[in-house]
Structure formats: structure tokens, C-alpha cells
Amino acid sequence: MNGERKSQDSVRDLLDPRRLLVFAEVARSGSLAAAAQALGWTQPAVAQHVKRLERDTGCTLVIRNSRGVTLTEAGQSLATHADAITARLRAARADLSALTDLRAGRVRLAAFPSACATFVPAAFALLRERAPGLDIRLTEAEPDEARRLLAAGDVDLAAIFDYDNVPDTPAEPARTPLFDDPILLVLPSGHPLADRTDTDLADAADQRWIAGCARCRAHLTTAAAGHGFLPDIRHSTDDYVVTQTLVSTGLGIALLPALALEAARDPQVTAIGLRRHTPRRVSLTSPADMPPSPATAAAMTALIDVTSPRRAAQSKKKA
């Protein structure tokens, strides 16, 4: 309590910055009338601010004469500080204008691997074209890690995905949907199911499986349970390139999102659709307790613009 009172007292002891700015203009102009004209105020209003500043400081700051005003020694000392404050405020305005106009600023994005290998670089290229002054930074992270980075303030924006059948964190208020990413069954070329356009997950119940990240593994086991079987998971890897290599050599089959196959496709594997299988949802999330900075908002716009053809194609397919 005493510390809080001391802090409040120290704030009250500070000189009124508005009056300091008025005084700085009086010092530069050399008269109350000229300062009033520069500020767009009346002369009595300027004079009142100077009088209140003299009362607050306990010093005589100006002496009026026929030519205007002359600064006292105290006035000259205070004018130096007032000029410094004016300069800092102008610099602050310039910095904020640069941020608002995207001539400066930083945006840090966390994104899952297949996003980093597909639409994120295209979005960053578009953002660099629109705002070359921005400092753009990328961290590869799966959704749970991306959320932790976001909560810790280590990134400003995160590209994440989630599945309908996997328990998720409470929905982020600041989530922006991007597109749905279909899940495909990945098989070695020549597999008995490989000549089909699509199939049911139950048709692969007796296969050996390769699982992905914790979230993807949960998606596989939950989906399989819905079809009445427990997948025989023999291998686990977060790397979709390794997954395809394992599949191509006949060590198992896997579920992979279309985005991963777009990022890197092994010619020795075949991917087919799954009937009645929901896609994963790709979205953006940002801190809910603060509005996005101009740089973050610009990055979001670029990511939305780059992925708009995917949303359009999905809408057309549904129609």
C-alpha cells in the first residue's frame, strides 16, 4: 500500500507535460502572442498555462517586455527540458506513423511444418512486396507448441490445425479460419487398395500403421475406433517425408493431410480419399487480450489472401 501511494505521489509531483509543450513554444517564439498563433490558441490561454507552470515550479520563468518575453535563468533551464520532451514526442509520433504505415515493425509467426513448406513462404513473399520495411520472422512449431509460444509472447501469430475428433484447447476468441485440409490414406504403389479412388477407413483395419505427431496419432486412433478397430501402429514420426519413405518401402500405411503431400510427394506412394472422413481445419490465432499490431494485421491479411484460392475451390466443390 505504501509503495502504491509513493508511486502515485511521484506521478503527481511531475510537471504537466501539456504545459511544458506550451512553454517550449513560448520559448521558441519569444512572445505569448506568437506562441498562441503557432498553437492556434488565444493569448490569454497561453498566458494561463505559463502562470500555472510557474506556480507548479515555484519559479519565475518569463519576464514580459515590449518585445515579448525574456526567459529567466530558471526559464532557460526548463526550456531545455521542454525542447527535449517535444523532440521525444515527435520521434514517438514518427515511430508510430512508420509502424502504422508498415514502413517499420516486426511480425513473428509460428506455423506447423507443412504450412511452412507451402502457403507460408508465399504469404511472406506477398507481405514483403506490400511492406518491404517489415521484419518478418518464422518459427516452425506444431499447434500445441505454437500456442505456448503465443502465450509466452515469443510470437505474434500462429498458424495451427485441429481435428474434429481430437479434444482441443478452448476455442481461441481470436481465431481466423483459413481452409480445410483433407486427410488422405497413403499406401505403397501396388497395394491392393491403391487402385481405388477412395475407400472407407475400415478397409485398412488389418494394416500396419505409421503414426504422426501426438495430435495426428490421436486423430488416427479415434477415427479407427469409430470404425471398430485399433490400429496396429508400428512406427511414429513427425516428418511427412519420412512417413512416405516408410510407406513406399512397405513398412506400413498412414494418414497424411493433403498439404503434407503438396509440400513433398514420394512418387512411390499412392494417396486416396477417405469416405465420410472429416478434414483438419487450418486457422490463424493471435493473443485474445490485445488487438493485433499493424504488422501482425498485415501478415494475417497476406495469409488470408494467399489461401483464398483453397477456400474458393472448397466452396465450389461443396456447391
Image (cartoon, rainbow, N blue to C red):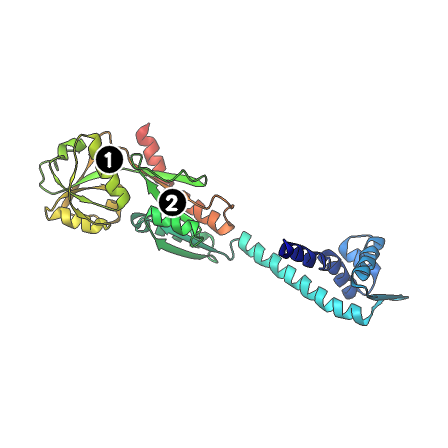
Circle on res. 147: none
Q: Are marks 1 and 2 in contact (CB under 8 Å)?
A: no
Q: Residues within 10 Å of mark 2 (few under 14, many from 20)?
A: some
- Viewer-proximal residue, 228 or 255? 228
Residue found 36% across the figure and 37% down from its top: 311
Q: Which residue is mark 2?
A: 306
Q: CA distance from mark 1 to mark 2?
A: 32 Å
The percent position of residue 83, horizontal first and vertical second, equals 70, 65
The percent position of residue 166, horizontal first and vertical second, equals 30, 37
Q: Which of the image's four quarters has the C terminus?
A: top left
In which quadrant of the rendered view does residue 315 lie? top left
The percent position of residue 94, horizontal first and vertical second, equals 60, 58
Residue found 68% across the figure and 63% down from its top: 85
Mark 2 residue type:
Val
Q: Which residue is mark 1?
A: 222
Residue 274 shows up from this direction: no
Kindly give the residue lying farthest to the front in the view shown.
Answer: 2
Mark 1 residue type:
Thr
In which quadrant of the rendered view does residue 22 lie? bottom right
In which quadrant of the rendered view does residue 211 lie? top left
Residue 189 falls left or right of residue 258: left
